[in-house]
């Protein structure tokens, strides 16, 4: 599948944003953070900024973005529509939570309720994003039990690492949060390795025989219907050389998981201003790594239509 | 609404005979010609006379070599929308632009509602939908809705353009929901198959597999042709000299 940057950035940014929002919404009301102005302002600004930037980026994928409002109508059948509805609905409790925290300076009562509701909405929205891909039968690498948990794990992971960087920045360091960031990054690493292992061993019943209805023997593509690349080949026929895939997988592992874990462990031992810088660096490196991971998520996915082209 | 109708009164569709298709591309050009001015038109061509020709087509003909223990053969394979009974391209549509008609089962797009998110083309395993980069919306086969119900056409012409154009009658149109229709009989007789049945899209269109190999054809090539009468002149003389 063609890895359109608008969609790669969209899923990565909103994943991190919703993860951070969910953590702020839960940890704020639990008394983990004091209802001070700056942590609330920067934290909620970062979370909602990432979400809004991602959602705006996703409209860059549309042929007719001015009609995007129509996408809220078909939530009964379409995961994409459900995602649209959930993402916009999340802004209501998130906005109230942010106002309560930043303007009123409180994290109790209705503000706490709004925070918890925002966290629930954030988790639901990430699930909807995951299901868009997990529900597509023609792409076996996506239509797999690994897809939806993967989106949730990566959202929690990048959200937690961002949360840690945020608190470290305000000298509100928490060993628990640091440890949680390391553990979630390890979990993300393990999940990605397991997903790749699953995809590499994938044996799907769909092949050139079932695609053409020609039973038995071998079916080899002699001639395409066209000499130039068409929409199908550009959109669904994206291929990367296997050697690049292997290198990119290594880069993903280093940037998204390996280096952030080293930096976070170092932050555990370092004094405050340096620990904060190192934590911020971990979040930035991980975000870059997740962009590569998401690029591969698309680039390595194979669509059944390519069977007609002998690819 | 992108929810699917629980029942369609008819199941209009195509039956494509892989035994008789000669890969002449007449259906492809007839489809383009009719539909570029039809319901889903235009079928935009990008850079049609340049080095990177691209454009929207509803029907594409592939050629395959099918080799079994009985031997090998070339199979020409027209590929277009199968108007599935459970088309995921419809249910994934976030705007309601894609729909399946309850009256005849045809899968259509309302171009005015399409936002061009391309998700329907991802959801179709058969590559039936093609994006029009010029207009910014998705396009697909309409089963020539503007022909098959068109009172201005002679009754015999009220079939999809691809069916009307086929010189070998490899394409058939009719109601596959009616077991007594000629097209259903044809499917039953020839053992028509679904494409990618394992994915569960339940395509309406059926493909008739090529008939089994037979021994009826001449097993040895004919003798080389001899000239009817001896050549005269210089070349004739050379021929006679060399032949003696």
Image: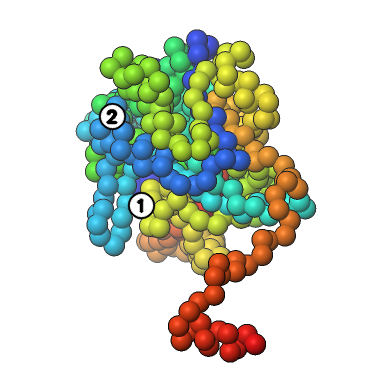
Q: Residue at x 45, y 83 (%)?
A: B233
Q: Looking at this view, is B56 or A299 the one in front?
A: B56
Task: Provide residue B151's location: percent of width, then percent of height.
Answer: 31, 14
- Distance of label 1 from label 2 (alpha carbons): 34 Å
Same chain under badges 1 and 2? The reply is no
Q: Nearer the viewer, residue A70 or A119?
A: A70
Query: What label does residue B93 carry, if any?
Result: none
Asked whether disc 1 touches disc 2, contact meaning CB atoms under 8 Å apart, the reply is: no
Q: Is residue A197 visible?
A: no
**B197 to A49, vertically: above or below:** above
Quadrant for residue A142, please give it. Answer: top right
Is A206 in front, or is A239? A206
Q: Quadrant of the C terminus of chain A?
A: bottom right
Foreground label between 1 and 2: 2
Q: Position of residue B75 (x, y in %)?
A: 59, 48
- Kind of element beneath mark 2: loop
Residue drawn at (61%, 40%) of the image: B19
Q: Residue under label 2, please give it.
A: B38
The chain ID associated with circle 2 is B
**Relative horizontal placement of residue B212, taking residue A139 as reference (left or right):** right
Which residue shows up at 57% across the image and 19% down it?
B182
Query: Seen from this angle, which residue lies furthest right?
Result: B69
Q: Mark 1 packing: few (<14 Cα in 10 Å), some, or many (20+)?
A: some
- The chain to which mark 1 is attached is A
Q: Quadrant of residue A31?
A: top left
Q: Which residue was labeled with disc 1?
A: A5
The number of numbered badges drawn on the structure is 2
In the rendered image, residue A9, in percent from the top left (x then y), is placed at: 37, 49
Q: Residue at x 72, y 60 (%)?
A: B220
Q: Is residue B129 above or below residue A75?
A: below
């Amino acid at each position: 599948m063609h890895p359109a940057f608008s969609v790669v950035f969209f899923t990565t940014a909103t994943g991190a944003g919703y993860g951070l929002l969910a953590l702020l919404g839960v940890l704020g009301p639990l008394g983990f953070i004091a209802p001070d102005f700056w942590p609330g302002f920067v934290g909620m600004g970062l979370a909602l900024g990432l979400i809004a930037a991602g959602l705006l980026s996703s409209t860059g994928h549309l042929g007719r973005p001015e009609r995007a409002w129509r996408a809220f109508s078909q939530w009964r059948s379409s995961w994409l529509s459900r995602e649209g509805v959930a993402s916009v609905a999340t802004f209501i409790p998130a906005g109230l939570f942010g106002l309560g925290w930043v303007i009123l300076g409180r994290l109790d009562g209705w503000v706490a309720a709004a925070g918890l509701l925002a966290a629930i909405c954030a988790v639901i929205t990430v699930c909807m994003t995951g299901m868009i891909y997990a529900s597509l039968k023609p792409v076996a690498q996506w239509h797999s039990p690994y897809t939806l948990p993967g989106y949730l794990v990566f959202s929690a992971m990048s959200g937690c690492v961002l949360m840690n960087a945020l608190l470290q920045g305000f000298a509100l360091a928490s060993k628990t949060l640091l440890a949680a960031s390391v553990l979630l990054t390890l979990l993300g690493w393990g999940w990605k390795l397991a997903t790749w292992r699953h995809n590499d061993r994938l044996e799907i019943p769909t092949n050139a025989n079932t695609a053409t209805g020609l039973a038995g023997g071998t079916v080899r593509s002699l001639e395409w219907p066209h000499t130039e690349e068409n929409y199908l080949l550009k959109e669904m026929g994206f291929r990367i050389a296997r050697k690049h895939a292997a290198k990119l997988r290594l880069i993903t592992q280093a940037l998204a998981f390996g280096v952030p874990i080293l930096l976070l462990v170092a932050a555990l031992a370092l004094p405050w201003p340096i620990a904060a810088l190192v934590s911020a660096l971990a979040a930035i490196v991980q975000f870059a790594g997740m962009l590569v991971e998401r690029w591969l998520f698309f680039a390595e996915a194979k669509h059944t239509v390519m069977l007609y082209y002998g690819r | 609404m992108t929810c699917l109708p629980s029942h369609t009164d008819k199941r209009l569709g195509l039956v494509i005979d892989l035994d008789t298709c000669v890969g002449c591309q007449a259906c492809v050009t007839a489809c383009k010609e009719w539909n570029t001015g039809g319901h889903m038109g235009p079928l935009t061509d990008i850079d049609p006379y340049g080095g990177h020709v691209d454009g929207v087509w509803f029907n594409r003909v592939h050629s395959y070599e099918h080799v079994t223990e009985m031997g090998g053969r070339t199979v020409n394979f027209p590929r277009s929308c199968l108007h599935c009974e459970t088309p995921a391209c419809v249910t994934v549509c976030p705007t309601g632009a894609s729909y399946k008609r309850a009256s005849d089962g045809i899968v259509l797009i309302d171009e005015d509602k399409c936002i061009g998110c391309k998700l329907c083309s991802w959801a179709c395993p058969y590559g039936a939908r093609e994006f029009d980069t010029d207009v910014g919306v998705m396009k697909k086969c309409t089963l020539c809705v503007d022909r098959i119900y068109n009172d201005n056409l002679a009754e015999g012409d009220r079939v999809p353009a691809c069916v009307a154009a086929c010189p070998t009658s490899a394409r058939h149109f009719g109601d596959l929901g009616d077991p007594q229709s000629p097209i259903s009989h044809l499917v039953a007789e020839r053992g028509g198959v679904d494409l990618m049945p394992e994915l569960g899209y339940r395509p309406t269109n059926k493909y008739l597999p090529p008939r089994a190999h037979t021994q009826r054809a001449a097993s040895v090539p004919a003798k080389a042709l001899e000239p009817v009468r001896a050549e005269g002149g210089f070349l004739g003389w050379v021929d006679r000299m060399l032949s003696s």
